[in-house]
Image (cartoon, rainbow, N blue to C red):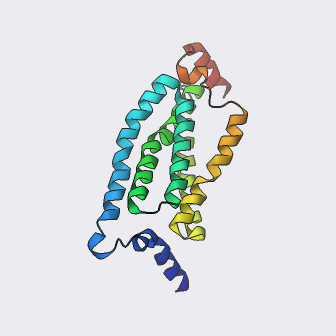
Amino acid sequence: MKGRRRLIKSTLGYQTRWDLVCSKRWLPVIVLTAFNASGFFGQCACLFIAKKFGKRVLFFSALLLQSASGVATAFSPNLICFAVFRCLAGMALPGVLIAPATLAHELTGWKQHSKVSLLCSAARSIGMVLLAGIVLFVGEWSNLALASSIPFYAFFLYSCRFDIFFPSPFSMGGCDPETLTSAGQSF
């Protein structure tokens, strides 16, 4: 019973923090709708960034935006800031989900396409299961936002060491089909 109360308290944390119950209970629905709608605008921005700078730059910039907005969400003082930071995270979501799968498909070739699709989907599903486990241990929503955002900063420091932000010829479309085919066969 005690664990159930803790779960209910952590689930309603932001609703009770900003008094979003009773007459204002529709506001969290609006914030969730804005988060999902911002994915459309994020998709448009991601297409532009991918065409102009490449998919690697798109992926890491979207990941940086998503983790920064996740940390900012944890410290948001009011509902307006919370909604803005959640919309920024929603805009980054298409780049975070689509760019790695597209890069993996480009690097492996058409023969490995189904295996790569399966691995990308499996990795995403495992991540969601791990997130559910983190929710059970962390509890409070602001701590969850930090726990799911801060590890990406270590990833950025690691990736900057290897100049991963610079686009590769694969992500800029500068390779011929033979190179892509040979890369797929070597994988």
What is the residue that sits farthest to the front in this orientation?
77
Q: Position of residue 148 (x, y in %)?
A: 58, 56
Q: Residue at x 55, y 42 (%)?
A: 63
**Residue 114 can be seen in this image:** no
Q: Count the marks.
A: 0
* Residue at 53%, 70% in the rendered image: 140
Whole-percent x, y for residue 22 in the image: 29, 76
Give the residue at x 53% y 29%.
Answer: 55
Q: Is residue 42 visible?
A: yes
Q: Quadrant of the C terminus?
A: top right
Question: How far from the left and from the top, in percent, is residue 155?
Answer: 66, 44
User: Compared with residue 167, is residue 77 higher up or lower down, i.e. above or below?
Assistant: below
Residue 62: give x, y in percent of width and height: 51, 40
Side of 151 relative to 79 (left or right)? right
Q: Is residue 6 above or below residue 67?
A: below
Which residue lies most toward the bottom here? 1
**Residue at the spot x=34%, y=52% of the render?**
34
The foreground one among 38 and 187 is 38
Residue 34 lies left or right of residue 128; in this view the side is left
Query: Which residue, as the protein is rendered here, is positioned at the far right?
Result: 161
Give the left or right position of residue 34, taking residue 156 as reference: left
Residue 48 sits above or below residue 71 on the image: above
Between 97 and 143, the one nearer to me in the picture: 143
Quadrant of res 38? top left
